[in-house]
Image: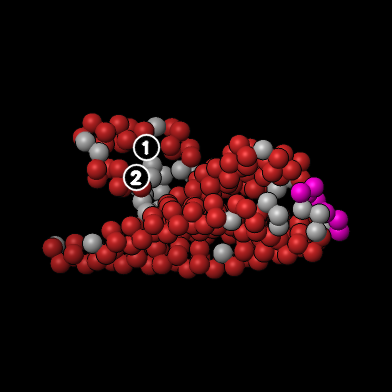
Amino acid sequence: MRAHRLRIAAGLGGLAALAGTALLAGPADERLTVHVLEHQLLVLVAAPLLVAAAPVRLALAVLPPAGRRALGRALRAWPARLLSHPAAGLVCFTAVMAVVHLPAAEDAALRHPVRHAVQHAALLWSAIALWAPAVAADPLPRHTGPIGRVAVVLAAMTVMAVIGAVIATAPAPLYAAYPDVDDQRTAGGLMWMAGMVASLPALLGCAWHALRAEERRQRARELHGAGS
């Protein structure tokens, strides 16, 4: 029951983060710092919280038997096995982060609302692909150990920090819509620090999951020993 309440809270928190990005849409058109904050909410708050809500578990609980069987077959199929690999999530996240923050891509997205929406959708879904094996709240066709989770999260946060550092240290404006160099430095610094700071809770979360898994294995060994 406690786990169920935590998943509900995570799902509501993820939806609240998505709503927060919508509220920032107006100010984000004027300041790069706010625009970067939108991206951080999508990648570092909304995505991991939505993953922690375990939507697949919820679907398995509420779907009729035919729906559960279809979902189970989809999870066992090769596309799901490929996408659930932590390396696939890392590659997807890295590619999207790099392309989205290219000056030409950013300026094109800011000129057209549909492109801007596609940009945010790409950030959200690539982050979900990154966080799904790291959080491991849903049953996945591929199991990732604690070391693999930590390595993937650290690599992804390093990518974010590097992109932030490039933006923060650029001597001239990178984006036509944001000519203020001081604002650009602040925005890059925000992304730089977010990539570094986000590593800590991710590491703590992975360590906690590893300890819980070891505790369950120890209890199983004790029960098996008592039964024999």
Name the residue: 44% across, 38% down. Answer: 81
Q: What is the basis of the colouring in this image?
A: secondary structure
Task: Find out whether residue 175 is within the magenta segment.
Answer: yes
> Viewed as shown, does residue 187 lie left or right of 225?
right
Location of residue 78 with respect to 175 vertically, above or below: above
In the picture, the disc for residue 56 is 2
Task: Name the residue that disc number 1 marks.
Answer: 75
> Viewed as shown, does residue 131 lie left or right of 157?
left
Name the residue: 80% across, 59% down. Answer: 180
> Viewed as shown, does residue 150 lie left or right of 94?
left
Residue 31 locus on image (x, y percent): 71, 57
Q: Does residue 149 show up?
A: no
Circle 1: residue type: Leu
Magenta residues span 171-177
Location of residue 111 with respect to 53 vertically, above or below: above
Viewer-closest of 130 and 112: 112
**Magenta: main secondary structure:** loop
Name the residue: 45% across, 50% down. Answer: 132
Crowding near the residue tagged with mark 2, few <14, some 14–19, many ≥20 C-alpha atoms within 10 Å: some
Task: Find out whether residue 139 is within the magenta segment.
Answer: no
Spatial separation of the CA atoms under disc 2 and disc 1: 10 Å
Q: Quadrant of residue 179?
A: bottom right
Q: Does residue 205 show up?
A: yes
Q: Residue furthest front?
A: 26
Q: Quadrant of the C terminus?
A: bottom left
Q: Quadrant of the N terminus?
A: bottom left
Location of residue 26 with respect to 111 vertically, above or below: below
Residue contact at pointers 2 and 1, CB within 8 angstroms: yes
Does dot 1 land on a helix, a strand or a loop? Answer: helix
Residue 153 locus on image (x, y percent): 55, 57
